[in-house]
Amino acid sequence: MRPLCAGLSLVLLAALLVHGETTTLSLLYTNDVHVHLERLESLRNLIAAERGKGLPVLLLDAGDTWQDFRRPLPIVWGAEEMLGWMNEVGYDAMAIGNHELYLGADRLAALAGGAAFPLLAANLRPVDSLAPFRPAMHVSAGGLDVLLIGLVTREQFPALEYPWLALEEPEAALAGVLAQEGGKADLVVVLGHLPVRDAVQIASRVPGVDVFVTGHSHEATPEPIRAGETLVIQSGEFGEALGRLRLEIDAETGAVVLGENALLATEVAPVALDRGYFTLFRILIGVAALALLLLF
Amino acid sequence: MRVALFPVFLSLLVGVSVASCADYPRHEFLDLPVGSTLGEVGRSSLQLVWNGQAASFRVSRSVAARLDVTALVRGEDLFSLGARIVVLQEPGLLSLTCEVEGETLRMIAGLPLGPFRLDWGRAFAGEERRWVVGTATLTPGWAAVLGVEYGGEAGVCPLLGVRLFPGLGLSALLCWRGGDLVVSLGGER
């Protein structure tokens, strides 16, 4: 028995020497959940199951999660519900989407203050440093130093609510952060609230990004899209799937040697919307009363 | 004399606001009533308006989370004090703001809808008018303004304009208002 074990060990050692030592990391990701609260229970179970496998996990969101005008009931109270759930399941970071900006500066700041994870947006430049988000952050996962960078689309930006913000081109902002970081991280992940085609374009011009988690366009990428060395992914919309990208990273070179993606389907669970009905009714009455009072 | 003061106001405005823009400012009100206050205690806003005939200069300062005080200098009554208070604020949606300035009382409702915003209101006493203004952000740097004012001697008065946001805490409004071109510049600190 002992010679057999020794032999197997030698074979494994030889395999490691030939292929180099790799670290496995799971990126779990969501985007454009748009307060679809009925998917949260299922998402929670999938996230717990993935964590239960014992591999290092990063849980990320690419924005448009706390707000949606097309869903009048959840938007009046759903942002807090979403945030509480994200804190509970342990998100590591979230990109700001254009819909988060629609909440207004005060409410966004309040929500960001209650978040146990940072909000990222490298191309939103405040006129000073006191903003409820930051451009990028480092996290440690599986012994790797992971650089997370946030980007947000320039489409449908509510400039009227944020005259104090300059919205840069995402490509220039990303290049700026990477130049500042100087390639120190083992893995670079961009959380970009941008369509897949924009991410592919940016990744083909700005080298140094390993993974580009996208959003905004509500696309699903069962297979990662390759743009040079970058894997571009998106999990669809409304929390219908949890994205899981399993990465094997060469510990020596930092190169991604394997990227295996899966979109894990979620199920719908009933959600009580009583609070939403009440608040929405109050707002509608308020709008009608103020219109009558002030205009006629 | 008023015309001569214009460059002085302009240089004062730009000099102050560029030098010290700070954290969460809200709207630059310009001369279009918008249902909001500056929000953060201690924040100041400067606004200069030129309507082709006269210039006015307004300084607003937030003294409580929902209360601003304003000082207005203009040709007609030289100097007047005012206050603006948010009396209703639904979460992220509807707001109602009351503004008292000189003899005029204004009630202003605001409904932000992402890249669109609707403001409507009514002025009582001093001046008697009502208005509805829609603003649509078309690109990050500028927004289109479309609205109508009515009441008083002017009758119905269409309003068409552009708001510019260079992203430095400054903003500008170019607005055609019933035959007059209104230029308004503002900044916050």
Image (cartoon, coloured by chain):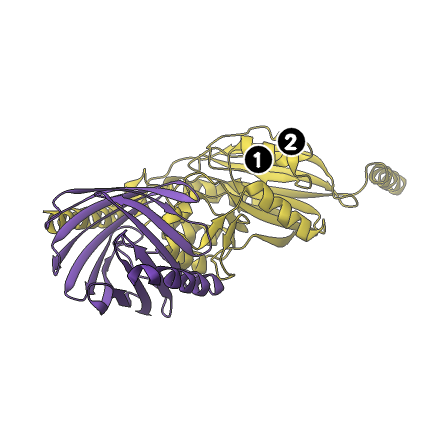
Chain colours: A yellow, B purple
Q: Residues within 10 Å of mark 2 (few under 14, many from 20)?
A: many
Vertical side of B134 occupied by A105: above or below: below
Vertical side of B88 occupied by B161: above or below: above
Q: Secondary structure at mark 1?
A: helix
- How far apart marks 1 and 2 lie (CA) works out to 9 Å
Q: Residue furthest right?
A: A3
The answer to whether residue B31 shows anywhere in this view is: yes
Q: Are marks 1 and 2 in contact (CB under 8 Å)?
A: yes
Tell whether B29 sits left or right of B107.
right
Quarter in which the N terminus of chain A is drawn: top right
Residue B99 horizontal/vertical position (percent): 21, 62
Residue B72 sits in which quadrant? bottom left
Pointer 2 indicates a residue of which chain? A
Nearest the viewer among A267 and B125 is B125
Q: Secondary structure at mark 2?
A: strand
Asked whether the residues under marks 1 and 2 belong to the same chain, the reply is yes
Residue A131 horizontal/vertical position (percent): 48, 58
Mark 1 vs mark 2: which is more N-terminal?
Answer: 1
Vertical side of B17 occupied by A236: above or below: above
Pointer 1 indicates a residue of which chain? A
Residue, x 18% and y 57% (percent of image)? B107
Q: Which mark is residue B154?
A: none
Residue A23 sits in which quadrant? top right
Vertical side of A244 occupied by A90: above or below: below
Residue A71 horizontal/vertical position (percent): 31, 39
Specify the amino acid type for callout 2: Ala
Specify the amino acid type for callout 1: Ala
Residue identifier under label 2: A227
Tell whether A178 sits left or right of B170.
right
Residue identifier under label 1: A199
Nearest the viewer among A281 and B117 is B117
Q: Residues within 10 Å of mark 1 (few under 14, many from 20)?
A: many
